[in-house]
Image: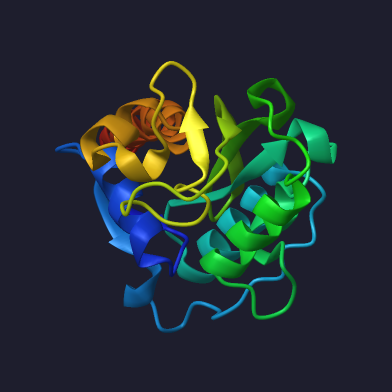
Amino acid sequence: MEVIVSTRNKNKFAEISKILSDAKIKAVSLEEFPQAPKRIKEDGDTFAANASIKALKIAHRTKKLTVADDSGLEVNALAGAPGVYSARFSGKGATYQSNNNKLLKALKDLPNKNQRKARFVCAVAIADAAGIIAVVEGTCPGYIALELKGDKGFGYDPLFEVNGYKKTFAQLSPKLKNQISHRAKAFSKAKKVILKYIDKSKINKVIFSLER
């Protein structure tokens, strides 16, 4: 079954498609649906709310099973910021670099590791044309490094040191990251929901065929 991944971020799609990889699932990029809206207003105040907005919008427009995520970084010392504003933390026209620079500046007076605790959060919504099927969440604890490290990944990856690894996401191999990250945990849960949905759909089709 085709499952639309509601993102135009190529890095995200590459990660997500690997996690969802299964003989029963064909992950399809939103880029393959020109009729889909280019921008979706994400005005929810939680990751789950924003993921649901995106999943519903695309599922209604395409009439296909859709998964959408909203994820971000929560820093303890910043009362959970940047949170749902992670992608636009440094304002209009924000880039990965400008966001990372702002975060480093905000924590410059907090050199102690325990003062720089943070976690990545990912909420994934699964929807079809009838509405939301499920919303699942994954988290990954760590802390903010004193400087950028590594050249892999994207976003805040060069600053986020994962608990137990002493390395940032940007220093880890993509394979390892896709096993331990917030997104990996959330989409692994989502994958189970999708597989159940597919199996249930097949059963319903068989029953409908017999009834006819």
Provide residue 184's location: percent of width, then percent of height. 39, 33
- Residue 82 visible to the viewer: yes
Residue name at image x 49 percent, y 20 percent: 163
At 69% from the left and 21% from the top, the residue drawn is: 114
Query: Horizontal and vertical percent for residue 9?
Result: 42, 66
* Closer-to-camera residue (25/177): 177
Residue in the image at 72% along x and 37% along y: 75
State the count of labels.
0
Residue 162 horizontal/vertical position (percent) = 47, 27
Q: Nearer the viewer, residue 134 or 69?
A: 69
Q: Quadrant of residue 29?
A: bottom left
Side (left or right) of 104 relative to 45: left
Q: Nearer the viewer, residue 164 or 208?
A: 164
Residue 79: x and y in percent read 85, 37
Judge whether residue 2 can be spotted in this image. Answer: no
Q: Residue at x 69, y 26 (%)?
A: 112
- Quadrant holding the C terminus: top left
Q: Nearer the viewer, residue 120 or 170?
A: 170
Position of 17 relative to 102 (above/below) = above
Q: Work out whether 160 lies above or below 64.
A: above
